[in-house]
Amino acid sequence: MPEISYNLYINDQPASQEILAAVQKIEVEDHANMADMLGLQMAIAMGDKVKGWTALDEDIFQRLSKIKIEIVIGSSKPKPLIDSYVIETSAQFSNEPGKSLLKVIAMDSTVLMNLDEKVRPWPNMADSDIATTIFQEYGMEPVVDSTQPSRQDVDTTTIQRETDIQFLKRLSDRYGYDCYVDLNSQSGKAEGHFHKPKLDAPPQGVLTVNMGSETNVNSFKSRYEMLRPITAQVTGLDIETQENQPASAESASYVSLGKESLAAKDRPRKVLLSHSGLVQTGELNTYAQAMVDESSWAIIAEGELNTVAYGGVLKAKSPILVRGAGNLFSGLYYIEKVLHIISGNGYVQRFSLKRNAIGLTKKENFAEDKSIES
């Protein structure tokens, strides 16, 4: 049974033994569509008259103090879970010894991109170029898919009227792109992502449900939201020509994670989109397609990993294989969220998955378990 431990850094310095001894629970939420979050709970007590309450009156967790968590399984190298910045602290005081608590909430680098609302023009640039520029301004390595068109200021200039991350999220919604900040699993450095979901990446491992000694999940449940997939239509008005610009999307364009797409062939739902802020048919088609692609995530699964049996750390925003869940719910999934819980009871990983197809493609390699890392 591999030993599981963690490393805690505060403002890039290893936490003291006093802090480590006081920590009761750490929760890290790794999410594909939201900022990654950290929750840290530790015991506090009355110190001497100079220091007052330990940790709390020592002012260790100041506004936007940096907290980093790494997880270590066995002899594998430490895997970064989160680089985060303190956004909230709260204290619970009790007359009972050991029951007084300090809770710290921190957010990944997204918080730095959400501090200042701006009014900023972006002339003569495609949305992907805008994303690249903004990420670089925060010292992040951009991981960006190219977009079209590159708008010319004589025709249209993109105007930002919100914080940088709100602006990038709004732009990414037009393409059905994922937009998030993440840590490179090898270098540990911050990356800014603006691209389609990486559905064609190699699966990071295999989740095995109810298969005797090979089982590596403590629980697994799934559902098929059959009315979720849609078709979409939208119309814009070209101001110069005063002509309607119709656009539509009938089927998903994302890589299919199974044999058969979940788009309804019999009496499909149709949605009329509006308030897109777009006028040209090409951009409207892209927007309609993005809405249809998002709706195609109709199979949802949740569960809890047996970390010792799996032998690794789950990471959101990438594919994973599931076997042992029947013909309907076995196959390739996209990991939307992982909640890492570190406490005196051990290390728990709870996951949320999604899928845009049913059935097996026969290309799945369930025997090749990539969860074990050196």
Image (tube, rainbow, N blue to C red):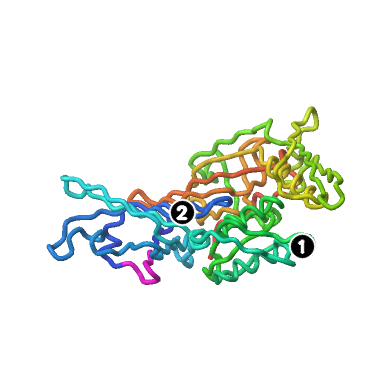
Name the dominant secondary structure of the magenta segment: strand
For label 2, the residue is 37
Q: Residue 320: x, y in percent?
A: 62, 50
Query: For this rendering, which residue is in front, 232 or 83?
Result: 232
| Magenta-colored stretch includes residue 12 | yes
Which quadrant of the view contains residue 148? Answer: bottom right
Instruction: Name the residue located 61 percent from the left edge and 37 percent from the top edge.
Output: 325
Residue 364 to residue 116: above or below: above
Magenta-span inclusion, residue 102: no
Q: Residues within 10 Å of mark 1 (few under 14, many from 20)?
A: some
What is the spatial separation of the Cα atoms under label 2 and label 1, in whole angstroms? 35 Å
Measured as percent of width and height from the top left, residue 227 is found at 68, 31
Percent across and percent down for residue 360 are 72, 42
- The structure residue drawn at horizontal position 64% and vertical position 38%, both measured from the top left corner, is 299
The amino acid type of the residue labelled 1 equals Arg
Point out the tag, 2 or 1, that comes first from the N-terminus. Answer: 2
Q: Mark 2: which secondary structure?
A: strand
Q: Is residue 263 above or below residue 90?
A: above
Q: Amino acid at mark 2?
A: Met
User: Is 260 or 283 nearer to us in this picture?
Assistant: 283
Q: Is residue 29 above or below residue 235?
A: below
Q: Report the side of 126 relative to 119 (left or right).
A: right
Residue 185 left/right relative to 83 = right
Q: Is residue 134 above or below residue 199?
A: below
- Residue at 38 percent across and 67 percent down: it is 9
- Secondary structure found at label 1: loop
Magenta stretch: give its range: 8-15
Quadrant placement of the N terminus: bottom left
User: Which residue position is annotated with label 1?
Assistant: 151
Q: Nearer the viewer, residue 262 or 108?
A: 108
